[in-house]
Amino acid sequence: MREFDLRALQMKECEMLKDFAKYCDENGIVYYLMYGTLIGAARHGGFIPWDDDIDVVMDLKNYRKFLKCAKKNYPEKYFVQNFRTDRNVWINWTKIRMNGTTSMECNRTDFDIHYGICMDIFPVVGKPKKKIISKLAQKAFRLQNILLGKYYVKTAGIQAEKKVRILHGIIPEILRTPICTLLEKIMYVNTERCELCYIIDNEASFSYSFNSKAFTGVSNERLIFEGEMYRVPNGWKDVLTAQYGDWRTPPPYTERGGHGDIIVDLENDYKTYYTGK
């Protein structure tokens, strides 16, 4: 049961998106709205009424450029979060968190990571034509997920599979980040070289493939999202149809919801709710 002002959260996330888009435009970085944010722009002109986050994607060239630039001068009120900047996170993409706020799953108050309200930035990578290379990329993705998940498995008290426990036991913590970085060299294939592409996220990533042209180059297509114009993929209608089918029709009322039970506080830092050691 979610007990917070959803619209107030959405407006705070709009502030994040506006600052993000301004930063990208000033630094020549191309992004696109994606997932529920793209549906919201296309169907509602803003947030899906029950949605509680922001999703964008970037092709590999722009994703790397963003990380390089943001490391130097992203606005100080935000924290750019990934496994390189927050050693306990288990995500293989990047989040932007707003400092001094809270958006935390109720069952993760003992997790020692930054839990400010956030938006997601997912990298788009090419799907190699050669099956052996594609399978290697998928194996690298799975191995990276296992290594990144070590802290989550331990803190959540999960009984992991034997092979996962072995990997967690034999790979020293000091090597985890370098190995995950090395695995990205296998996973990250430039979309410009490939007809099809994937989006790296936690939903297996390789379940959906898209035409790479949707996410490469500079799309001139934009949609209104909460009163502002933002970039959307080339042929965005085809992109939505490929992933969701009939995206124009809202789901049944019983299927409308956000990301579960979360603690939202727009005025107080996530550390206020931290119960770990």
Image: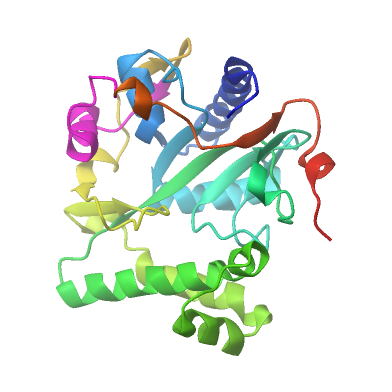
Is 220 left or right of 97, judged from the image as shown? Answer: left
Q: Position of residue 250 (x, y in %)?
A: 29, 20
Identify the residue at horizontal 63%, vertical 62% (top origin).
156
Q: How many marks?
A: 0
Q: Position of residue 42 (x, y in %)?
A: 31, 19
Quadrant assignment, res 187? bottom left
As displayed, is residue 124 above or below residue 133? above
Q: Relative to the observer, which residue lies in front, 137 or 195?
A: 137
| Residue 34, visible in the rendered structure | no
The answer to whether 128 appears left or right of 260 in the picture is left
Q: Is residue 216 left or right of residue 110?
A: left
* 140 shown above or below 260: below
Quadrant location of the C terminus? Answer: bottom right
What is the magenta range? 230-251
Q: Quadrant of the N terminus?
A: top right
- Taking the magenta stretch, the answer to whether it contains residue 244 is yes
Which residue occupies the extreme bottom position in the image? Answer: 170
Q: Is residue 268 magenta?
A: no
